[in-house]
Amino acid sequence: NLSQIRSNLYAAFAPLYTPNQQQEDLLPNRLKYIPFLQRHVNLKDSLHNLRAFVNEDTTSAAFAHRSILCQSVSDLKEESLSSMKRSASSPIFQAIENDGLLNFSAQVTRLVKNLCELSEDATRMHLKISSSHVHTKSPVDSEYILSLIDTLYSMADRCRLSPEMRLYWLLQIMERHNTLSHFAEAAQCLAHCAAIVAEHLVNRDQLSAGLNLHGCADLADAVGNFNVLEESCVCGQKDSSLSSPSCQAPVYASDLAASFAHYDTSHYFTTSGWANLISMTAEAFSKAGLYEFVPRIYGKLTPMLETLCQYAQLSDVHGEIKDAYLALQKQQHKKRLFNAYFRVGFYGALLGPMNGSEYVYREVPFTKLPEMTQRITAYYAEKFGEDRIVVIKDSNVVNPRALDSNKVYFQITYVEPYFEDCELRRRTTELQRNYVLKRFVHSLPFTPKGPAHGSLSEQFQRQIILTTERHFPYIKSRLAVVSKTNQVLSPIEVAYGDVSRRVQQLESALRTKPVDVKFLQMILQGCIGTTVNQGPVEVALTFLKPGNPVTPLPESTFILNEAAYIDAQNRLRVCFRQMLQHSYHALCINRDMVGTDQLEYHRELERQFKIVTVQLSPLLKLETCPDRK
């Protein structure tokens, strides 16, 4: 039984690593001419036969085998606990002693399930690779590559217990991201690869002199991304618990079949191989424009190079660090471009497991909603036909019962990163507010009377906050939404958000060096323009005028009493003060930069600023709640 399974495994998976005919010829003649899909059918049949045989076996051999394992684990545990690694090894041996883990039948069942799922992924990948779409670079066909990346990711996830295999698939994903110019995702793939090797160099006790590593945590700290911690040796597959340690013995090239040797990744599991991965990771982060992390990544490598007196390599490394700092210096006073995010909902029985699922897509800067919609609909139109594709135009909650079962529905919405106030105080730079993102928000305006839009005093807003399975950027450019929460903003909070956005735009325009005069004037006109509909003066008169009654707001999530309302008024006053200060600063800069042909326009801006200042000044005095007096 085992020899048959071994032959079927080899026949099924060899073509994935040996795509050319010369290496395929190394297969035995009786397996060489079996079609790829039939090989996987044979593999599944033999695996199911093995599982049935083990489940029906009631002999004492399995119990004897289990008792021998228990005794071996006990002896090894006693030996380990007396060593210096007691604290690290004790949890692992405790996990191995678990009855379920040592149940031979359960182990075989889990292995068969994993191999069957891996076989299904391999079949899907083979069909997608054979498609002509993965060899093009058009925006529509890039959706095919994203689908292929999802399959490769699934295969890499099922190979967590074999680090060399997982490394291989991650490198395959990295190549696909480079094809799509998703350089940040490609950099994350390499960071995960370096973390895998670091983790196993520590656990295999193969660190060289000067290399002070503690595992994947070093790489997670260097690239500033929590996702890398999933490469820890105590992390098994998604559906497993911590009782499945993935610290395995290394797979060396000499143990592999000849046809696999060219694609073997075990050479990375050495100090020199890890150093090469670190260099590749730093270069990838530089290519992605994430220069802040380049010195931190190289910082994990330089102590070893210094200990080994590798001065030529040290010179090259410090040259790369210098280039990263020079790039940061050039960008210091320029507006950096960051990615756009879209939430895509999939609905319809034809989609199978994807029905009802939601994803957040990370797209290149300046991607527009119509571009995103056209790309996704064109991809699925080829699968189901254009007459079955329906795009839901609004962002309201979708009722699955109201949908046609013979059609495929998409709901595509632009979303923005969501931060609470405490996060904003910690994330002070533009990079920090666009890196390691897991929560996103989109808003739905409404009024108590029914229409979506109304006057300032009636305009509520419902915010839908989405949480993804991992942080962006990740080794995938689209992540599933795992939870959603709703919160309702009262009219004064909606107004505060609008004024706050204008202040942030004004701050961004003032930080840019050299200042973009046209952009500065456009933002300034929106802040102090007296003719702007629902401008700052109207907002202030609506919410800050003395004597306005404070009415209960049962629809609001936060404004539930008079004290909370007064706090919201004070936040709005502080925001108006900041707006006036930045507007004055912007006027001074505009006066020095405009030509003679715009002097009259500048005088008009100054006149509007004086009018707005006079009207707002009486309303900007901070108040205290009567209860607090």
Image: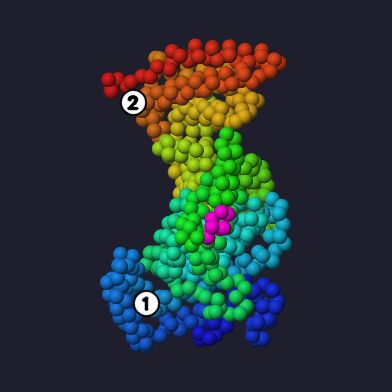
- In the image, 276 versus 5, the foreground residue is 276
| Label 1 packing within 10 angstroms: few (<14), some (14-19), many (20+) | some
Q: Amino acid at mark 1?
A: Asn
* Magenta stretch prevailing secondary structure: helix
- Stretch of the chain drawn in magenta: 310-316
Task: Name the element at disc 2.
Answer: helix
Q: Amino acid at mark 2?
A: Ala
Residue 514 drawn at (x, y percent): 62, 29
Residue beneath disc 2: 563
Q: Nearer the viewer, residue 285 or 183?
A: 285
At horizontal 32% and vertical 22% (from top left) the residue drawn is: 625
**Location of residue 535 in the rendering, given as x and y in whole percent from the top left corner:** 55, 21
Residue at position x 57%, y 72% from top?
264
Label 2, residues with CA under 10 Å away: few <14, some 14-19, many ≥20 = some
* Nearer to the camera, 485 or 391: 485
Residue 506, position in %: x, y? 55, 27
The residue singled out by tag 1 in the image is 103
Find residue 475 and report its horizontal and vertical position in percent.
55, 56
Q: Does the magenta-highlighted stretch encompass residue 312?
A: yes
Can residue 245 be seen by looking at this rendering?
yes
